[in-house]
Image: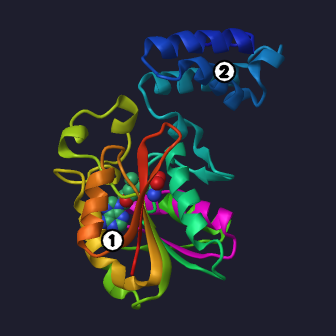
Amino acid sequence: MVNPGQLPWAAALELRRRLREAGCPDWDWEGPWLVEMVTGRQPRFDDTPLTAGQAAELEELARNREKRIPLQYLSGKWDFLTVTLRVGKGVLCPRSDTELLCQEGAALIQRIPEPQVLDLCAGTGCVGIGIKSLVPGAQVTCLEKSPQALEYLKENCSAYGVAWKEGDLFGYEKELPAQSLDLITANPPYLTKEEMAQLQPEVAWEPAMALDGGEDGLVFYRYLAARYGDCLKPGGWMALEIGWEQGEAVASLLEKEGWTRIRVARDYEDRDRVVLACRP
Ligand SMILES: C[S@@+](CC[C@H](N)C(=O)[O-])C[C@H]1O[C@@H](n2cnc3c(N)ncnc32)[C@H](O)[C@@H]1O
């Protein structure tokens, strides 16, 4: 129990122990991090005892984290590349793995003046906003279907000068003028039915709609490969985040649909993470 009058570092040590016992993978840095979230100061440089309000707030945070509610949801905001995004229940937490999708996508449009970019399955908007931060001249639109996720998307996009739209990826391509885009990005739901049945505790708090990619995890990729080519200018690109075991499968279904220059990029853990494909 966190108590008023406790020194911040003592509270941080206690939280570390509790989070370790609760099975939180990053208990060692999360304990001090939660204390800093409440006091605004790093606990190891802080000898001001906790007030009653701070102790109560910290205790509530600790109990929620013990339930394995994602740290991002407890914080309400999260850093991604150089931007800070609003996040909470109802939307997927932005992950550092996804930064690679932005970097690879941005590299493809770097030399195009005012490139037109569409980010599908936008969630918080991290991908579209991330691209805009790397290529400030880009005209980016983010599409999202979930009303809960849209609340976060609207706020984040407004803060960073990115357009957003409510819509369903399955059919939205019909609203797009032919050959109008330079880049389509997407981090679609890609877990298989089997993976959906054994989610990590933190991931189980996130919306199923953000995770469920159908029986084999590839439902969204099949549709994107078959239907979204016509919206791209000749020589335009599609950049897709994938599950680390899906590189070959996604590359092969893009190839079957006539995409060219297909490449799989690997993340910092040296795992397949992004597939890039060009419209001939
Ligand atoms: C894996 S999450 C990615 C979110 C965000 N791009 C990111 O990288 O953190 C997939 C997102 O797709 C959205 N989504 C699911 N089905 C959709 C559909 N049919 N049309 C548009 N968006 C959809 C989900 O609500 C979720 O926000």
Ligand 1 lies in quarter? bottom left
- Looking at mark 1, is its residue's CB closer than 8 Å to ligand 1? yes
Residue 1 in sight in this render: no
Looking at the rendered structure, the kind of residue marked 1 is: Leu
Percent position of residue 74, x then y: 54, 36
Determine the secondary structure under disc 1.
helix
Which disc number belongs to residue 169?
A: 1
Rendering quarter of residue 144: bottom left
Residue located 43% across and 16% down the image: 22
Does the magenta segment cover residue 198?
A: no
- Image position of 142 with respect to 123: above or below: below
For the residue pair 69 and 262, the one nearer the viewer reads as 262
Residue located 33% across and 73% down the image: 259
Alpha carbons under labels 1 and 2: distance apart: 41 Å
- Image position of 189 with respect to 227: above or below: above
Q: Quadrant of the C terminus?
A: bottom left
- Residue at image mark 2: 32
